[in-house]
Amino acid sequence: MIVFFNFVLQNAPKAIKMKSSLIIFSVLVFSLFPGGKASGQVSQDKLVNLCVEESGKDATYLKDYVVKLPKATKPDNPPVARHTLALHKNIHYRFTICNSEKYPGRGIIRIYDTKGMLATNFIKKTGKIYNSVDFFCKKSGPYTVYISFKDGEPGMAVSILSYVKK
C-alpha cells in the first residue's frame, strides 16, 4: 500500500503531491490513534454522575475532582490529593465523595483555611465516614481541600463541590 502511494506521489504534480501527503498523513494518524473515550474515562464519568445525584436535590453542581491514590508506604503518612479553591462568604457548600468499587479505600475530605481544619466527613472517635460534609463559608478567601483514603488504602474517588440552595 505504501509503495502504491509512493508511486502516485512521484508521478503527480506538486499541488496534488501536497494534498495527497496530507490525506495519507491524516489517515495514518487517525488509524494509529482511534478516537473515543478510554475505558477508565467512562467509569470516571459514571462515578461523577452518580456522585452528583448523591449530592442531593437541594445541591447545584459546581466542580468535581477525580482522585486516585496508591497504597500508603508508611501507615502514618498516607498519600493526599490537595485542591485549593476560592469560596465565598455566606454561601452554603456541600462536599460529596463517592468511592470507586474497584478499590478498597474510603475517601476522607478535610477542609482547611489558614487557621486550621474547618470541616471533615470523618469522625475519628467512631471511625464513621459520611458521604458528604456541609460547609457554611463565613469568610471569602482561599480554602484547601485534602482528600485521602482511610488507613492509607489505595483508592479512587470523585469529590463533588456543590452550592446548597437556601
Image (tube, rainbow, N blue to C red):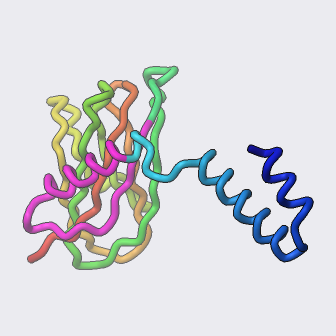
Give the quadrant of the N terminus.
top right
Q: Quadrant of residue 166?
A: bottom left
State the residue in front, 123 or 166: 166
Residue in the foreground of this view, choosing between 147 and 18: 18
Q: Identify the residue at horizontal 60%, vertical 53% (top origin).
A: 30
Number of marks present in the image shown: 0
Q: Single out the residue that lies furthest toward the top.
A: 74
Residue 48 lies within the magenta run: yes
The reply, left or right, for residue 157 in relation to residue 7 is left
**Vertical placement of 97 versus 154: above or below?**
below
Q: Is residue 55 left or right of residue 18?
A: left
Q: Which residues are magenta?
A: 42-68
Residue at (42%, 58%) from the top-left corner? 144
Q: Quadrant of residue 123?
A: top left
Residue 2 lies in the magenta stretch: no
| Percent x, y of residue 10 | 91, 59
Residue 116 placed where, x, y %?
38, 54
Q: Position of residue 110 (x, y in %)?
A: 33, 48
Give the residue at x 40% y 40%.
40
Observer-nearest residue: 109 or 19? 19
**Residue 3 in the image: above or below residue 55:** above
Q: Nearer the viewer, residue 50 or 149?
A: 50
Q: Residue at x 83, y 45 (%)?
A: 3
